[in-house]
Image: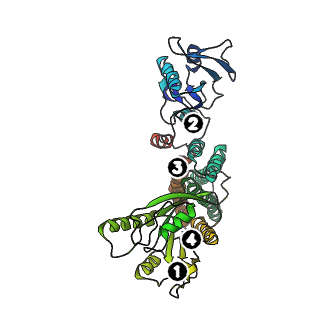
């Protein structure tokens, strides 16, 4: 592929901003080696894959720092272009001066994700691998990091391209039968149904693993809801192992949502403590209850906390009924005081936030409600972005329509449009149909310097 940005040379800080042991200033482009020659003094020659120690100077030859320069020649670099890394002492002033000097010598400051974008455009990474780089940088849990790392091998692109090839093969057979009916027989209908079914099964598997991967990367939102004084804030504090939320016997103490994260089986779970839901509330408390309902709507799992030692009141009955058709964990708290006969829910966790066994049971119930208790194998490459998930959903819709057409006995040539739609949709994953808007959206997630 052609280079990005007309062949200009870019510079950026590749290490986090702030004070550290070292700072790395990265330069990429056709003038990278010449720029290094102006800004670096050493007894040795700047050669590919050779580490040189020397003096970094500005555009006027005034010393900035002593450090290391590493040069990688095209195409044997991350971007596929000539690249230079200046490794200097981790002073923000020193790093800023090196970048300023590079710009004075003809480079320009890189935009977010521009190094990785150049790697994609120069064929060093496919679009899926590029997105995986951003996911790996942003990972907030071990599972998220492992899931992102699995996508850096390019395996998903091979799978998707193979599926596109199978769709293209059917399209070619149909086109041949339409254009040369006397010479090319129409493909066997049962065979077509079977072949499309195989592709559909593979895409459905990719969709399931992709949705699980997205959940691992972004975390699982879990809303803690229930009537006042059931022990919602106490549960949050117990799961966190610290007093994060204010606990009081006064009803309506919690007026706003509080969000904190815990890890359950290596998955980040975003716990959202909410205001107790009740009918007779003042204006401020009512505003908190409205936020509770919004949190409940957006959560993947609801933990419904009830006072197991007290009768089941109207508010409690209402929240139990409201959450009956969604993923939830019913928790009868304060069971150490005895369980009231009103509570007959067989699927509830019964116990107390003061008991370790109860907290472990709630964690297990969250895993079961949130992801079935066991995640798919995220060590395999999987769909990573909403764009990819939507592309597979679009392809599945088209393929299901094509299969239904064949099963109804309609003419086989009618499925060509659906097959073409599926083929094009999958092209958004491989990058063959990537638009400028899509590329901009992907690389905007990156930090400057990556």
- Pointer 3 or 1: first along the chain: 1
Label 2 CA crowd tier, 10 Å (few <14, some 14–19, many 20+): many
**Where does the C terminus fall, quadrant-wise?**
top right
**Where does the N terminus fall, quadrant-wise?**
top right
- Pointer 1 or 4: first along the chain: 1
Q: Position of residue 305 (x, y in %)?
A: 50, 73
Secondary element under disc 1, as helix, strand or loop, is loop
Distance in Å between CA atoms under marks 4 and 3: 53 Å
Residue 246 visible in image: yes
Secondary element under disc 4, as helix, strand or loop, is loop
Q: Residue at x 56, y 33 (%)?
A: 15
Residue highlighted by disc 3: 424
Q: Position of residue 110 (x, y in %)?
A: 49, 30
Q: Position of residue 109 (x, y in %)?
A: 47, 27
Q: Nearer the viewer, residue 170 or 372?
A: 372
- The tag on residue 120 is 2
Label 4 CA crowd tier, 10 Å (few <14, some 14–19, many 20+): many
Labels 3, 1: front one: 1
Label 1 CA crowd tier, 10 Å (few <14, some 14–19, many 20+): many
Residue highlighted by disc 4: 353
- The tag on residue 191 is none
Labels 3, 2: front one: 2
- Toward the front, the furthest residue is 249
- Pointer 3 or 2: first along the chain: 2
């Amino acid at each position: 592929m052609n280079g990005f940005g007309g062949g200009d040379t870019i510079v950026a800080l590749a290490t986090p901003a702030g004070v550290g042991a070292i700072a790395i200033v990265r330069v990429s482009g056709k003038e990278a080696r010449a720029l290094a020659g102006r800004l670096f003094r050493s007894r040795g020659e700047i050669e590919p894959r050779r580490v040189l120690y020397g003096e970094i100077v500005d555009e006027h030859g005034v010393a900035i720092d002593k450090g290391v320069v590493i040069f990688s020649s095209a195409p044997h670099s991350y971007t596929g272009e000539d690249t230079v890394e200046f490794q200097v002492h981790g002073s923000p002033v020193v790093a800023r001066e090196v970048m300023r000097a590079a710009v004075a010598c003809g480079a320009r400051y890189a935009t977010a994700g521009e190094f990785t974008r150049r790697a994609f455009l120069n064929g060093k990474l496919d679009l899926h691998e590029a997105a995986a780089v951003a996911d790996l940088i942003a990972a907030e849990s071990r599972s998220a990091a492992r899931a992102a790392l699995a996508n850096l091998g390019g395996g998903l692109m091979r799978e998707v391209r193979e599926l596109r090839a199978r769709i293209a093969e059917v399209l070619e057979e149909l086109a041949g039968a339409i254009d040369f009916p006397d010479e090319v027989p129409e493909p066997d209908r049962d065979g077509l149904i079977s072949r499309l079914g195989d592709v559909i099964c593979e895409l459905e598997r990719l969709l399931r693993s992709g949705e699980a991967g997205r959940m691992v990367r972004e975390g699982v939102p879990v809303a803690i809801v229930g009537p006042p004084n059931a022990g919602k804030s106490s549960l949050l504090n117990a799961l966190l192992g610290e007093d994060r939320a204010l606990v009081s016997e006064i009803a309506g103490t919690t007026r706003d949502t509080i969000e904190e994260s815990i890890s359950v089986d290596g998955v980040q779970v975003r716990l959202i403590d909410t205001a107790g839901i009740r009918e007779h509330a003042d204006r401020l408390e009512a505003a908190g209850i409205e936020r509770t309902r919004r949190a409940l709507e957006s959560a993947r799992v609801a933990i419904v906390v009830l006072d197991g030692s007290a009768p089941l009141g109207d508010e409690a009955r209402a929240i139990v009924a409201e959450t009956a058709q969604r993923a939830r964990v019913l928790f009868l708290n304060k069971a150490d005081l005895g369980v009231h006969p009103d509570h007959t829910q067989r699927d509830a966790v019964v116990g107390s936030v003061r008991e370790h066994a109860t907290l472990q049971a709630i964690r297990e119930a969250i895993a079961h409600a949130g992801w079935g208790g066991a995640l798919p194998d995220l060590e395999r490459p999987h769909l990573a972005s909403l764009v990819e998930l939507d592309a597979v959903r679009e392809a599945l819709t088209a393929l299901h329509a094509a299969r239904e057409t064949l099963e109804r006995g309609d003419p086989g040539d009618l499925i060509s449009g659906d097959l073409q739609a599926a083929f094009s949709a999958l092209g958004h994953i491989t990058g063959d149909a990537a638009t400028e808007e899509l590329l901009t959206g992907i690389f905007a997630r990156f930090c400057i310097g990556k």
